[in-house]
Amino acid sequence: MTPEKAAERIRKFGVENTFWGCDFPMWSHTDEIANFFALGFSEEENRMILSENFKRFYDIDA
């Protein structure tokens, strides 16, 4: 998927409804996180996608 298509889909479904993950060891997690940051979301949106949404979904207080 192109970066543009990925960003479009995330925006369509909502940053607040998105988790980030990678298929390690199939792909390099360091490459995939770099690809994620290249999508151009704000720092707050990145934080939501990378951790806050997961914690909210699973009711984790940490």
Image: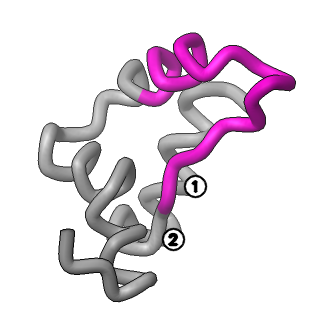
Q: Residues within 10 Å of mark 1 (few under 14, many from 20)?
A: few
| Left or right position of 48 against 26 | left
What residue sits 31% from the left and 29% below the top? 40
In the rendered image, the quadrant that contains the N terminus is top right
Look at the image and say whether residue 33 sits in the magenta stretch.
yes
How has the structure been colored for display?
one colour
Q: Which amino acid is tagged 2?
A: Phe
| Left or right position of 46 against 36 | left
Vertical relation: 52 (above or below) 44: below
Stretch of the chain drawn in magenta: 19-36
Tags 2 and 1 in contact by the CB under 8 Å rule? yes
Q: Which residue is mark 1?
A: 9
Total numbered badges shown on the rendered structure: 2
Vertical relation: 47 (above or below) 15: above
| Residue toward you, 56 or 16 | 56
What residue sits 49% from the left and 42% below the top? 7
Q: Which amino acid is tagged 1?
A: Arg
Question: Percent position (x, y) of residue 21?
Answer: 59, 45
Question: Percent position (x, y) of residue 59?
Answer: 34, 87
Question: Percent position (x, y) of residue 61?
Answer: 20, 78
Which residue is farthest front? 62
Q: Residues within 10 Å of mark 2 (few under 14, many from 20)?
A: few
Q: Which residue is mark 2?
A: 13
| Residue toward you, 50 or 18 | 50
